[in-house]
Amino acid sequence: MPQGNGTGRTVSPASPHPDIPASSSLEAGIPAGIAIQHRDALDAVQREFREIKGTTVIIYDQTCATEKRRRRKRGTLVDPAKRVVINELVCEGCGDCSVQSNCISVEPLETELGRKRQINQSTCNKDLSCVKGFCPSFVTVEGGSLKKKTKSSGNSAEGNWPALPMPEVADVHTAPGGVWGIVVAGVGGTGVITIGQLLGVAAHLEGKGIVTQDAGGLAQKGGATWSHVLIGAMQDAIRTTRVGMASADLILGCDPIVVAGKETLLRMRPGRTHVALNAVSTPTAAFVKNANWVNPSEQCLVDIAHAVGAEHVGAFDADAVAVKVLGDSIYTNPMMLGFAWQKGWIPLQLESLMRAIELNAVAVAQNKLAFEWGRRAAQDVDAVKRALNPGQVIAFSPRQKQSLDDLVAHRVAFLREYQNAAYAQQYLDFVSKVRAAEQGMGVAEKLPLTEAVARYLFKLMAYKDEYEVARLYTDPAFQAKVNAMFEGDFKLHYHLAPPMLARTNDKGELQKTSFGPWMRLGFRLLAPMKVLRGSALDVFGKTEERRQERALIQEYRAAIEGMLPLLSPANRDVAAAFARVPEQIRGFGHVKARHLVAARTQWDLLQTQFHAPKQQAA
Ligand code: SF4
């Protein structure tokens, strides 16, 4: 603890952060003369302190994200009526928000126009650091609350379900040594440990022997987490605290990536282990680091089936069902518990599990309902799918395959709105020219170069300047999306860095500021001014960023045009790779500028490759 010569600093996420009271516990007892600063100042404080001779101390105080969520759920920490939403129309998928926040609640969203970002409202800690991502895509919704699922939305199929048959409950005596080993495997912060506790309490209520041990990421949100549960007919039968190698009778798999990891696979044995699996994985920390990350859920399923035999795996998209039925993916794990129980893979009675949920005293009705839906899925997963049409709610789905004509038509219509019919025609004419050249090679079945140009000439032409951002914010689709998510009295705040008004940081980068609901009026006024785009009256168009964006369109067209007369089956893939490079030029301002530098290097390499004389065969 630095003592009061006034040179020390303590840095904490203190006020004005909304869920830290002005006089936090940290402030109590801090000697006078020692400042408390927001964690944003940590870098600056570290730089300052490294210049001070002698010993310096920085205390970084921050409540663990999972603990915060737990306290909010139990009502011991204020839950601010503030949520973040990303306008995916504006989002460029650059990933800066993931980098800034290091948060896995910023998830990929696959759209017709490429991968964007969305906030997983179920797991969001309201830390709001993602808002620092340098782009105008973020709005904060202040006031109101997330819409609750109602009978008419989530549980419309509730009345149609026949009574579920009671399964043959597993008998601990049938397990080797009379001890039933369960490993609950999932992601920290999603209730993995709670499932272990529920199993423990239920076993205790039945007078069975029970040992549970939690391992791994524990409260670390996003980390792999396991809860080992050993259930014996008698306490004395249990001689370890963890499920040993090849000794699991059940893997309750809440996340496929964790289940397919070495630590969990080692507990499985073909012929003994059953796996109840939530089939779709939460995007992992890998996505935070790599904007092009691909969810490996399908491969995980293959690996797990290989480890225990496909007939011993029961899998369904519990996450999607939980969101659809209960409006929150936090109910995925109790749903998996119900699924495994109905399969007869848990040696405990229904009554004791229900009582354990009651004794847990958190969202009892919802947890019981989730358990019930898990049972239904175990009984007839197709009926659950039909009832809920979960195809609509699985957000992480591969980009839909569409015909080239559809792809082009969609973008022509977009550019007409973006600027005007003439602008859209320029796009169409160029794509048609490339198409004719590619078809002229006599390879008609697939046109990779034309498809690439159709996607990325569009991306370059639809650059998001101030008029476009305003147009996209006044698009009724965005307001409808927000209205569908929230209820009550809420207001939208926009986080923008207008070039003429925004402050810069010490690196010269523009900084975002929050604008209130009146900004919507500003957007309405600004959107029609797109007619000025590129003209002498275009005040926004004079910045370096906008000039570069306009120049890039011409550069790209000229480079592709230069390739067309030389196009051959041998170099077409290189030309297509060249045409796809703008995929990487994502984001806004300094983020986009950084990506452009990398893209230019790639372009140079591919240009050289395209024009290089063919190597003579030795
Ligand atoms: S544009 Fe980039 S920073 Fe903004 S929301 Fe999309 S991915 Fe995040």
Image: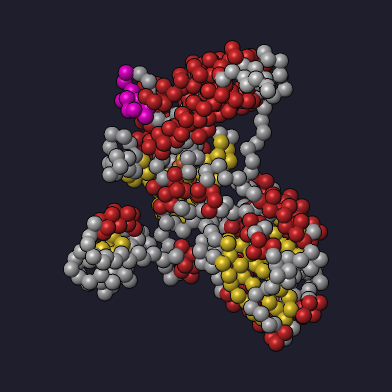
554 or 149: nearer the viewer? 554
User: Could you tell me which quadrant the N terminus lies in?
Assistant: bottom left
Q: Is residue 9 left or right of residue 90?
A: left
Q: Is residue 605 above or below residue 91?
A: above
Q: Which residues are magenta?
A: 536-546
Residue 450 point in image, percent of width and height: 61, 22
Q: In which image quadrant can residue 340 be found?
A: bottom right
292 or 480: nearer the viewer? 292
Residue 500 point in image, percent of width and height: 28, 34
What residue sits 43% from the left and 52% below the top? 101
Q: In which image quadrant can residue 211 be found?
A: bottom right
Count of numbered circles on the image: 0
Does the stretch in magenta take in 537? Answer: yes
User: Could you tell me which quadrant the C terminus lies in?
Assistant: top right
Q: Is residue 204 above or below residue 442?
A: below
Residue 250 visible in rendering: no
Residue 180 point in image, percent of width and height: 73, 75
Q: In which image quadrant can residue 310 be found?
A: bottom right
What residue sits 60% from the left and 75% below the top? 213
